[in-house]
């Protein structure tokens, strides 16, 4: 995730490849959520529809200067198992909006990072920006994520968030009788946990 060359102090992350570093999605601590404001019939106030899945795989690779190696960086989310607090909503989202039988995955291809020095810190928290190409429903669109990360040795955890519209990815806004209105903005959140490859 991270750019900018600092002094070449050797950290555990750098020792992973001898030149750069490769981090992979850890077996636990990962969840992707969509969040959309909706107004349901029979309710006085709008609420957030939230769907989530823990089916996340992939990793991020950095070169010796801390720049992302785009060709070797990809995070894949299996959206076939997205669930919220309403099964009818889940069926509609998967069948009519995301069409998960045809497009089962959402893919983030990280391309650059700004606001965080290299080598990576091994303690503390940082906030920075990650850019990457997001593919949803077969459509690829550039996105910028605000990342709040905590560093613990070589482990990296935290939350990344971005937002986009239905139209950005050619998605159809839900229109069913029980839903009076749906906001045009989709918020995507990723609670992440990355560890060095091979750890």
Image (cartoon, grey):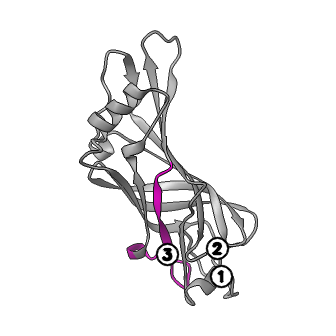
For the N terminus, the image quarter is bottom right
Q: Residue at x 41, y 73 (%)?
A: 70
Q: Helix, strand or loop at disc 1?
A: loop
* Residue at mark 2 to residue at mark 3: CA–CA distance: 16 Å
Specify start and end residues of the magenta stretch as a single range: 54-71
Q: Nearer the viewer, residue 4 or 148?
A: 148
The answer to whether marks 3 and 1 mark residues whose Cβ atoms lie closer than 8 Å is no
Q: What is the count of numbered marks?
A: 3
Q: Judge whether 52 appears above or below 40 on screen.
A: below
Q: Helix, strand or loop at disc 2?
A: loop
Residue 79 sits inside the magenta stretch: no
Q: Position of residue 120 (x, y in %)?
A: 65, 74
Q: Judge whether 19 appears above or below 178 on screen.
A: below
Res 114 quadrant in image? bottom right
Q: Residue at x 51, y 82 (%)?
A: 63
The answer to whether marks 1 and 2 mark residues whose Cβ atoms lie closer than 8 Å is yes
Residue under pointer 3: 61
Q: Position of residue 151 (x, y in %)?
A: 70, 65
Q: Earlier in the sequence, mark 1 or mark 2?
A: 1
Residue under pointer 2: 117
Q: Residue at x 38, y 75 (%)?
A: 71
Residue under pointer 1: 6
């Amino acid at each position: 995730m991270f750019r900018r060359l600092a002094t070449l102090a050797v950290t555990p992350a750098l020792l992973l490849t001898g030149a750069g570093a490769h981090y992979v999605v850890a077996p636990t601590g990962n969840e992707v959520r969509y969040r959309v404001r909706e107004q349901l019939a029979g309710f006085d106030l709008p609420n957030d529809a939230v769907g989530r899945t823990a089916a996340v795989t992939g990793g991020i690779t950095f070169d010796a200067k801390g720049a992302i190696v785009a060709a070797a960086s990809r995070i894949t989310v299996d959206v076939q198992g997205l669930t919220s607090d309403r099964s009818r909503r889940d069926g509609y989202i998967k069948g009519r909006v995301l069409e998960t039988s045809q497009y089962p995955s959402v893919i983030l291809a990280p391309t650059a990072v700004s606001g965080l020095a290299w080598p990576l810190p091994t303690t503390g928290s940082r906030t920075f920006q990650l850019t990457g190409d997001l593919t949803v429903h077969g459509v690829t669109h550039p996105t910028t994520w605000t990342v709040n990360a905590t560093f613990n040795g070589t482990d990296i955890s935290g939350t990344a968030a971005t937002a986009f519209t239905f139209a950005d990815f050619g998605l159809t806004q839900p229109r069913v009788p029980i839903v009076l209105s749906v906001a045009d903005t989709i918020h995507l959140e990723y609670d992440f946990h990355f560890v060095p490859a091979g750890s």
